[in-house]
Amino acid sequence: MNIFNYVLSIINNTLMTLIGIAFTVQVIYVLLFFVKEKKFPEAKTKHKFAVVIPARNESQVIGDTVKHIMQLNYPKDLYDVFVIADNCTDNTAQIARDAGAIVIEHFDDNPEHKRVGYALQYAFDIILKEYDNYEAVVRFDADNLCNVDYLKYMNDALDSGVKLARGYNNSKNLTQNIVSGVSGLWYIRDCRFSAHSRKVIKCGQLLVGSGMMFSMDLLKEDGGWNCVSMVEDQEFAIKQLYKGYKADYVSDAIVYDDQPTTIKDNINRHIRIGNGVNKLFWTDGIKCLGKFFTTFKYTYLDVFLTLLFIPMAVVMCTWLPAYYIYDIVYHLIVGNVAHVLAVVKVIVYALIFAFIVPFILQAWLVAVLEKKKIGRENCKRLVPTILSFPLFMIIYAIGITLGVFSKPKWKQIQRNNVVIVDSENLIGGDNAPVKNNENVDVVANTAETVEENTDVTTKEEDEISSHVLTEEEKEKLAKLTAETDIKDDAV
């Protein structure tokens, strides 16, 4: 029995060491928050973009998204919006056309092809053959918004020689409720700490589908889009890394994502991510570890450690509880109470000082550092979210583990139809999703939502509007609101 326990102890110590290494790297990234990143110089040439939006039964949001993107602060003759209507059974395609997009309809009955990668593959084959005049692609999701200078900032990166890049992932509904808050704050944390620090040390990034940019040359080199896994964005970044292209980070290009507002939706999202990234880890993750030891390029090790968080989540949900429950029960049976008390003490201290406190501090630091992009009024309302931040890791780990041991199927996403933007961001500024002089009604009213999906109360709406406006701002906001009311009446 002693040999058996000794073997279990070795396995546990090995796993804890791997977890410690991965988390140590993340701690270092957090500690580099104060280092200023190098910005891209203003581009000498404005390049032509294809903005690509995959959409499956997204009639609720696609019209507003297309209209919003059509109003970006970039020459209108230097970008087109393509909507890939993927196996749609609603009027997504027609709504997108009416909004001004070029629509590519994709139908595929193969149940194994119910992933966005196949829709992108089909669409890019058409774009490369029939619209071969674009220099780069920016991909958005159907519910995304972005700041008005998004293409400008991506163009600066492209003109500086960057072949692929990710933007800054902000949230449309950060303060809708605690669930959307912790989810949105997690992505903001990833940008401010992980992506920022990788850029500072000149390490490559893993791409995020929302807002990713890449040169059309990469598609031509590959003969089209060849990444069709559940996590095609990360797969694409790794495939380009093998070719010598590191993904960069453009912090001024801000994309606003719709975050899930229920624990169920949050878990479902991570089930999909867990399934896809787990497969990627055992293929490309292991390959990247091997390449690190042959090339000694840190980016390969960083990719491995990033993907390692998926099997780590499984270990934390399965092995660790099972091992420590067994250890405590065994030593209770043999009467070693001192050992049990020591183990319980270590577990309690670890939970408090290695889990709860660090994640709360990270969330607080993110809110403080990013108050301009989040919005000062939104930051004031994030206290419950910050205190709940450690819970996100538990939900994350559970969802990931379920994804690893299941085969998730495509499910229709319930859009929240809500945009909660602090008035300071709504009225103007480079980080606003829509400037006040833009004739776009997507974010004109900050708390308009489908009744059953909103947690925004009258009091919260008042807080959103608590920013003191100048007379000029009041006149502009009144004009925009009047235009929105006219549009609402027309609808």
Image (cartoon, rainbow, N blue to C red):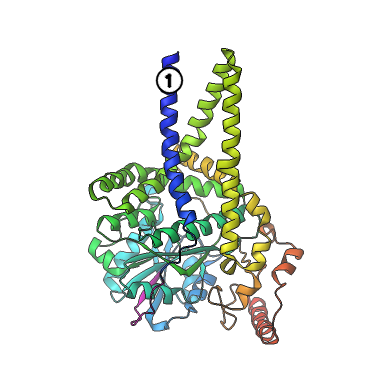
Task: Locate the C terminus by quadrant.
Answer: bottom right
Three-letter amino acid code at disc 1?
Answer: Tyr
The answer to whether 26 is drawn above or below residue 444 in the figure is above
Relative image position of residue 213 (x, y in whole percent):
38, 67
Camera-nearest residue between 12 and 481: 12
- Could one spot residue 415 in this view of the protein? no
Label count reads 1
The answer to whether 49 is drawn above or below residue 26 in the figure is below
Camera-nearest residue between 202 and 420: 202
Residue at the spot 49% in from the left edge and 68% down from the top edge: 254
Magenta span: 39-51
Left or right: residue 249 compared with residue 361: left
Let me know if residue 43 is in the magenta part. Answer: yes
**Mark 1 neighbour density, 10 Å: few (under 14) some (14–19) many (20 or more):** few
Give the residue furthest to the right: 459
Let me know if residue 226 is in the magenta part. Answer: no
Q: Secondary structure at mark 1?
A: helix
Residue at the spot 32% in from the left edge and 52% down from the top edge: 298
Relative image position of residue 225 (x, y in whole percent):
30, 60
Relative image position of residue 107 (x, y in whole percent):
39, 58
Left or right: residue 61 compared with residue 199: right
> Chief secondary structure of the magenta span?
loop
Residue beneath disc 1: 6
Q: Quadrant of residue 137?
A: bottom left
Relative image position of residue 138 (x, y in whole percent):
40, 68
Q: Quadrant of residue 242?
A: bottom left
Task: Locate the N terminus by quadrant.
Answer: top left
- Could one spot residue 127 in this view of the protein? yes
Left or right: residue 63 compared with residue 51: right
Q: Quadrant of residue 46?
A: bottom left
